[in-house]
Image (cartoon, rainbow, N blue to C red):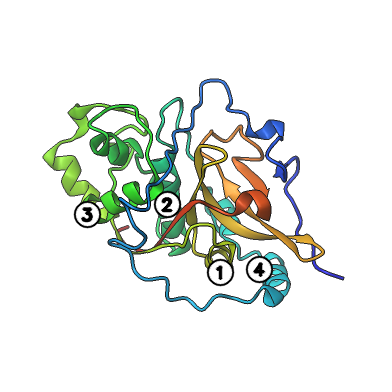
């Protein structure tokens, strides 16, 4: 009998794409734009995906062990008290996904929680307009410039007044130094990252939305999915968490920050 993951109380499980949990809550937004792979090809500044893909036949045992030992990324986030992000009407989901992955990676490395500003990434890229984009745009900016903490640049503030020399210097301590640009529509690469506890910012054209992939999930009968953390506040799903079944979980754009600067 195959292993079945345990779900959080009232955690949404998205299988068909018609679930009410996909509706944009009042006051929220999305913002993912389709990545043009001809103009923005796979790779770029990213490290080649050099991880051996974990065979599907091993997924049940690995997921079961992660759940028994409470060593999933969501377990680490919960233990540390890391909250999900709240894009609050901005069209910056594509920056919120990678920024949350950086926060998660810091927590997994034993660093203190520092909430970081998605607007400090997205607003300069989009010339301070509330426009959409995709994850690799945000992550490439983070590699070069870093992220400003929300104490210096409010999370959703689309304003040039925060783009100061002082804030740019602070952002240097919150850079990504190594990341993967995953092959689009490759569920195996995504699951390999999650089984190795590497968070992935995933963009879905069908949803026009980007979220953070956190945990691998076993649905039984050799069916699988992922646990996501959304950027629609702690009131979404269960503390921002939901589960996408494989059919809907296979991303069109996926980037994974693997190494961050260890600044405490």
Q: CA distance from mark 4 to mark 1?
A: 13 Å
- Could you tell which of marks 3 and 4 lies nearer the N-terminus? 4
Residue where numbered disc 2 is placed: 103
> Mark 1 and mark 4 in contact (Cβ < 8 Å)?
no
Disc 2 vs disc 1: which is toward the camera? 1
Mark 1 lies on residue: 192
Q: CA distance from mark 3 to mark 2?
A: 17 Å
Q: Residue at x 59, y 68 (%)?
A: 195
Mark number, residue 102: none
Residue at the left extreme of this rendering:
165
Estimate how packed mark 1 is, as few (under 14), some (14 to 19) or many (20 or more) residues with alpha carbons within 10 Å: some
For marks 4 and 1 on the same chain, the one whose residue lies earlier in the sequence? 4
- Say how many tags the image has: 4
Q: CA distance from mark 3 to mark 4?
A: 34 Å
Say the numbered circle drawn on residue 66.
4
Q: Secondary structure at mark 2?
A: helix
Residue 63 in percent (x, y) is at 68, 68
- Single out the mark in the foreground, 4 or 1: 1
- Mark 2, residues whose alpha carbon is within 10 Å: few (<14), some, or many (≥20)? many
Give the class, few, some or many, for how many residues have Cα within 10 Å of label 3's Cα (few <14, many ≥20): some
Q: Which mark is residue 144?
A: 3
Q: Report, in whole angstroms, how far the alpha carbon at label 2 lies from the one at label 1.
A: 20 Å
């Amino acid at each position: 009998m195959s292993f079945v993951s345990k779900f959080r109380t009232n955690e949404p499980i998205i299988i068909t794409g018609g679930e009410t949990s996909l509706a944009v809550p009042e006051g929220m937004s999305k913002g993912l734009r389709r990545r043009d792979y001809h103009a923005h090809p796979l790779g770029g500044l990213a490290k080649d995906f050099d991880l051996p893909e974990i065979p599907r036949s091993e997924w049940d045992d690995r997921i079961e062990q992660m759940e028994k030992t409470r060593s999933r990324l969501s377990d680490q986030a919960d233990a540390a008290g890391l909250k999900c992000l709240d894009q609050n009407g901005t069209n910056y989901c594509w920056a919120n996904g990678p920024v949350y992955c950086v926060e998660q990676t810091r927590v997994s490395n034993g660093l203190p929680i520092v909430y970081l500003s998605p607007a400090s990434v997205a607003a300069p890229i989009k010339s301070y307009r509330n426009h959409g984009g995709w994850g690799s745009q945000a992550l490439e900016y983070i590699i070069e410039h870093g992220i400003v903490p929300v104490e210096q640049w409010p999370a959703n503030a689309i304003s040039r007044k925060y783009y100061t020399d002082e804030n740019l210097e602070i952002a240097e301590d919150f850079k990504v130094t190594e990341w993967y640009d995953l092959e689009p529509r490759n569920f195996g690469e995504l699951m390999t990252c999650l089984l190795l506890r590497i968070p992935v910012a995933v963009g879905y054209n069908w949803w026009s939305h980007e979220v953070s992939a956190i945990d691998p999930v076993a649905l039984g009968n050799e069916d699988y999915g992922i646990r996501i953390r959304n950027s629609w506040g702690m009131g979404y799903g269960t503390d921002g968490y939901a589960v996408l079944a494989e059919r809907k979980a296979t991303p069109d754009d996926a980037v994974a920050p693997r190494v961050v600067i260890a600044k405490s």
